Structure formats: C-alpha cells, structure tokens
Amino acid sequence: MRKILAAATAVVLLAGCTGGGGKAASTNNVTAITSGGNHAPTTITVWSFNTLPNEVKAFRDDLGRLHAKYPWLTVKFVPGKDDAAYAKAIAAGNPPDVFISTAPDNVGEFCHNGTVLDMTNYLKSAGIDVAATFPKASLIYTQYLGKQCALPLLTDAYGLYYNKKLFAAANIVAPPKTFTELVDDAKKLTIKNSDGSIKQWGIVTREEWDSNANLYMGVQTNSNFYANGKATFASDPNWRALLGLDKSLQNYYGASNVAKFVARYQPHTDDAANPFLTGVIAMTYAGEWHIGENAAVPSIDYGVAPFPVPDDQVSRYGVGNTQGTVLYISSHTQHPQEAFFAAQQLTTDTTFLDTLADAVSNIPSTFASLAAWNQANDPHWQTFISIFKNPGSYYKELTAAGAQDAQAWGQWVQDFEQGKVNDDGGGLQSIASQVDKLNTHAN
C-alpha cells in the first residue's frame, strides 16, 4: 500500500527548459494511434514508483495483456522510480517514455519547464473528452494553465477513520462534523496516565504525522494557496482556523507527548502495528489505502467519514483533499504516438483500473471504472468515493515551483507546532512572502 505526503515529496529543481536527448516531440497536428490496424513494432519504457510485489505484478499483468492485444507494442516496465530519479534521467538526456508518479506535486514544474508532453491535442485526436471521462477533482491536479500535462491513474481521497468500539465506550454516537465536535470527541476519547503521559489518544493532527501533511492543503477550511497569484496564508483567516484546531489539541495533550507519539509510531503508519489498528489512537486522518491495510486486523470495527470542517462551514461537510497517481509522457520521447497509446490504455481501460485499484487499495479514476468497480457498494469505500466526487473537494493549485510551496508551508506548520513561529499576521505573512518568492524564482 502507499501513502502520499504532499509536503514530503522530494524536491525536484529543474531550472529552465530541461534537456532530454534531442528535440522535444511536437504536439501540433498530432494523430493518435487507433486501436485497429497494423503498426510497426515499437518498444517503449514505462517507469513507475510502485515497489510492492502485488502492485508491480498488477502492472506487469496488464502490460502483458496490452501486448497480447497489440503485439506490435512492447513495454519495458521499470518499478521503483520516484520524481527525483525521473528528474535525473531528464537531465542526463535519457528519460523513460512514460513516467508514473505517486503524487501530482511536480505537475506544474514539469509542465512549465517543458519536461513533459502536453497531451491535449493527442486526447482530442483520440476522441477523449477528459471532462466526461475523469471526475473534476482529478483534472485539477493534472492540468496546468490549460494544458493536460498529466493523466490521472487511480485516485486518493482523505477522510477520518474512527474506532467504533472506542466511540461507544466514550458514549459518542456519530463521527464529528465540525472542528469543535472533533476537539470535544478527541478529549472524551483520550485517556491520560497519572504521570501526564497519554495511554489512549483521540486524534493527532501534528503535520509530520502519517498523512497529516495533506490536511494542511486547505480544503477542509475552503482555503486556496493563492489568490490573484499571491499566497493567502496571511490574507485568508480560515488558515488560522486550521492552525487553531491543531494548537488546541496539542495544548491539551502536551507538546512533548505529541512529539513522543510521532517518534514512536511514525515507523508504523502502514502496518499492523500502527496505533489505529492497535487501539492506541481512536481517530486518524488518512487516505483510502488504509482500508486495505486495516484488513491485516480483521477484528477492528471501524468507520470512515469525511474530515470535519470549521463550525461556520458545516454546509461544506463531505469535502476532502483529493489527489493521486499521475502519468506523464516525456517531452523528448522518440515515440510520442506509441507512448500516448499506452498511456491511453492505462488511464482509461476499465478492467485495468479496477484490477489495479483492488491490488493497491486506491480509487478508480474514471467515471466508467467507478461505475463498474465491485467495491463501490462497500460502506468504507463509499465514503471515499463520495469525497472524490464531491464538487467541493480539490487539491492545491499547481505552480511552476512544483512541490516547493507545499514543502515550505509544511515546514512552517511544523515550526508553528514547535513554538518557533506564531500564527499572527507577521508569522503568516513571512511564509506567504517566502512562497511568493519561490514562485517568482520558478517563473
């Protein structure tokens, strides 16, 4: 299984237009390859971040089916490659034809620098209407300034997992919908030892814990990173509502207790020893892939709900951060038509998407694959599908700075949690100015 930590994505710095071993493929007057007819034998290379055996097998099996269906197309599949490895390959002039990344953080940077192909005209030639094929939330993180520089390949949505047994013991009958309810429930669910340490936690919102970096992307408070091209951390008061939630919980637990919790359990966020599965923590913010991981402890009785929203935004309850795996075509590929043909099959074939979703515990990324998926009626999955489809769900704006803006903001939040900076006008203006400078430099 995988998890996405937006603010922890490797920094990829590609100054100016990147090299790629020859002339970049033209995206003008392109013609997509049709499914029928003969074609010259072609071999392309596809890199992917996946490393777990079941995930790699799912890709290899589908690529094998693709070759059986189209014998002229051979795909050399190379797993275990991240954005940093891809950037190095680009700089060395030897990129793969197709690269599948775990997260969309660098879509803006890769698109701005000409690292990846704008697939807009290929999609038009192939007769693919992206708005009719992919839910809106996935287009937000694959488009940059009107260019379709990436395609979604499975999706992640984030919500609140809660332990039903612990809720019942605390006389809590339903998951919280507002920030106030979340704090109240967290306190009811917390059991402190006589020495002030914590035996059982309600929820930990520390930015560096598990998937919490995604909580600070602004969706829950209806905050956008930018307005009129400028960072909004100081100008949008809703950012302070999110920071206030974090601060109130940390003050209740004690900063040292929270730090010890993160240090102890961070290695166990994706296995049977993680604190949610062992009952150490009653609620946790995480993505849908934890459904697959929770199967390691069949005895746990848990529910999934959207993460709460500020008290004055209760009408927005149901939204969540949405992002996911993205597929790129290198702009300097020698086989742009064949690379797009493979990309088209991988990102729109219902059987493959549903098979891969089962293998990696992610959400299928097209309307057709969602409708056909055999997990769609499962109550746990239904929650995440609803979050994915919610018109208020989104991912932060993409910029030419790539992952750097989220990284800078994430570090600032950590500094805030450690008392190094304040969430007053001056403190928030400092991070806003820092992010603005990153974007100015990237452009």
Image (cartoon, rainbow, N blue to C red):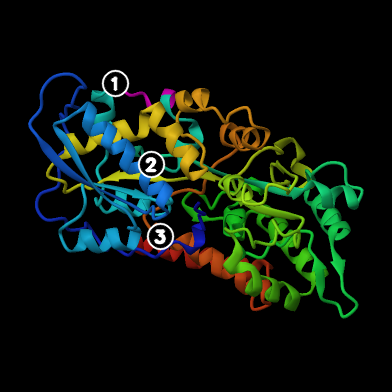
Front position among marks 3 and 1: 1
Q: Does residue 354 appear to the left or right of 417 in the view shown? A: left
| Number of callouts | 3
Q: Pointer 1: what residue?
A: 127
- Residue 119 drawn above or below residue 171: above
Location of the C terminus (image quadrant): bottom left
Q: Nearer the viewer, residue 369 or 107?
A: 369
Q: Which mark is residue 439?
A: 3
Query: Residue at the spot x=63%, y=70% of the render?
Result: 427
Mark 1 or mark 3, which is nearer the start of the sequence? 1
- Tell me if 422 is positioned left or right of 172 in this view: left
Q: Earlier in the sequence, mark 2 or mark 3?
A: 2
Q: Which residues are magenta?
A: 127-132
* Kind of residue at badge 1: Gly
Residue 194 magenta-drawn?
no
Report the residue marked by disc 2: 58
C-alpha gap between disc 3 and disc 1: 35 Å
Compare marks 1 and 2 and give the one earlier in the sequence: 2
**Residue at (48% x, 45% y) in the render:** 360
Numbered disc in front, either 2 or 3: 2
* Amino acid bearing label 3: Asn
CA distance for labels 1 and 2:
27 Å
Asked if disc 2 and disc 3 are in contact, CB closer than 8 Å, the reply is no
Residue 205 visible? The answer is: yes
**Foreground residue, 159 or 239?**
159
Q: Are marks 1 and 2 in contact (CB under 8 Å)?
A: no
**SS of the residue at dot 2?**
helix
Residue 131 in magenta stretch: yes
Measure the alpha-carbon separation of dots 2 and 3.
38 Å
